[in-house]
């Protein structure tokens, strides 16, 4: 990657239109586009929390102007802007850029995979961050974990799903490798930016929509279109968020500001986990009071989805050395995490009723 100067003091014109670094009296100001509406609960507030923490911890030496999805770059093009140097830093789920490398799915979420807590444990202690750094270095990027939605809803459907047959030919908005799994089950899986979900479901352009979970689904008004929601999403048991820096920009930051950014990302992640857990519970109760029915997908659907996932991940592993590498590390930790959860977490949840 051609080295680009982001912190050149006295620069009057940015090398790229979105970077626009302002350096005055020892202060740095960078644009920070996110893939989400910046005020969206959980996903949007995650990046604004990160920006606020960095500004406070650095006493204003480094600050970010946050732009919502589509304000500067399209939601699915945030990492492209950061990679090209058009933005020094961006925010979103890594799987929005999985067209660059399918291994990126494992740093957001994969079907029947890790919970939010397990994911951050793998990244911090299980070698996940080192692999992530290496894969992103191929594109001149430096990533940091910044949060997680927790287990998501399987989707809002206009009609009941009583068997696998009811999925045939269904047009459904669904992100990540869950979309690939549902395609194998006969669904026409469509990926669209979050702001388009409500209108598409309302107009009949899609028959069902997977978004996030009760808090965000309610905020986007999906309950106004249908009162039928299926959960949980075995295809998305915990979707990670990330703050991603252009590596040249990152390298130009002094060591103390680098440390502040890294720790602000982890602080924002902890806050994000708590936000989703607390407000998802509140939103679910509110949605039930509003007449929403929550159901589990039929057993034949979940069984077929598990088989389909085995096919999808095996196909990706054969096609990509990066997938093979990340999957080996991911699956090794997941095996021990699964055994621990069965012995400790599941009995506690079952026992408390």
Image: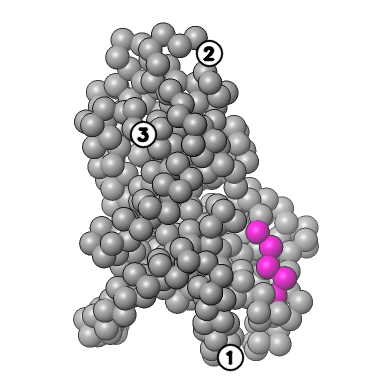
The reply to whether residue 145 is visible in this rendering is: yes
Residue lying at 58% horizontally and 87% vertically, measured from the top left? 304
Under tag 3, what secondary structure?
Answer: helix
Who comes first in sequence, dot 2 or dot 1?
2
Look at discs 2 and 1 and give the one toward the viewer: 2
- Magenta span has 241? no
Disc 1 packing (10 Å; few <14; some 14–19; many ≥20): few
Which residues make up the magenta segment?
187-191
Distance from disc 2 to disc 1, alpha carbons, whole Å, reads 59 Å
Percent from the top left, x then y, of residue 149?
42, 59
Distance from disc 1 to disc 3, alpha carbons, whole Å, reads 48 Å
Disc 3 packing (10 Å; few <14; some 14–19; many ≥20): many
**Outermost residue to the bottom:** 300
Which residue corresponds to mark 3? 250
Which residue corresponds to mark 1? 300
Look at discs 1 and 3 and give the one toward the viewer: 3
Percent from the top left, x then y, of residue 297?
56, 82
Which residue corresponds to mark 2? 13
Name the quarter where the C terminus is drawn. bottom left
Under tag 2, what secondary structure?
Answer: loop
């Amino acid at each position: 990657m051609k080295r680009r100067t982001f912190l050149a003091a006295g620069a009057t014109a940015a090398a790229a239109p979105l970077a626009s670094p302002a350096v005055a009296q020892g202060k740095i100001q960078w644009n920070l586009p996110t893939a989400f509406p910046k005020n969206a609960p959980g996903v949007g507030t995650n990046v604004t929390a990160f920006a606020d923490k960095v500004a406070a911890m650095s006493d204003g030496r480094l600050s970010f102007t946050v732009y919502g999805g589509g304000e500067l770059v399209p939601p699915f093009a945030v990492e492209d802007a950061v990679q090209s140097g058009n933005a020094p830093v961006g925010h979103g789920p890594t799987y929005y850029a999985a067209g660059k490398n399918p291994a990126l799915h494992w740093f957001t979420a994969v079907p029947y995979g890790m919970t939010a807590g397990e994911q951050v444990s793998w990244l911090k202690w299980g070698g996940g961050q080192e692999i992530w750094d290496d894969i992103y270095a191929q594109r001149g990027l430096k990533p940091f974990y910044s949060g997680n939605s927790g287990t998501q809803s399987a989707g809002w459907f206009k009609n009941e799903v009583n068997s696998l047959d009811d999925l045939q030919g269904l047009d459904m908005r669904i992100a990540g490798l869950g979309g690939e799994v549902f395609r194998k089950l006969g669904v026409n899986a469509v990926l669209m930016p979050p702001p388009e979900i409500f209108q598409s479901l309302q107009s009949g352009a899609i028959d069902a929509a997977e978004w996030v979970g009760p808090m965000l689904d309610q905020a986007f008004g999906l309950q106004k279109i249908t009162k039928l929601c299926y959960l949980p999403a075995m295809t998305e048991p915990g979707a990670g968020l990330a703050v991603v820096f252009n590596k040249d920009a990152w390298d130009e930051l002094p060591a103390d500001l680098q440390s502040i950014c890294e720790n602000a990302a982890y602080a924002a992640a902890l806050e994000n986990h708590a936000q989703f857990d607390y407000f998802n519970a509140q939103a679910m109760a509110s949605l039930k009071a509003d007449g929403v029915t929550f159901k589990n997908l039929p057993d034949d659907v979940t069984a077929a989805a598990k088989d389909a996932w085995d096919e999808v991940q095996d196909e990706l592993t054969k096609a990509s050395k990066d997938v093979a590498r990340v999957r080996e590390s991911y699956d090794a930790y997941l095996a021990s995490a699964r055994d621990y959860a069965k012995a400790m977490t599941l009995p506690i949840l079952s026992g408390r009723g």
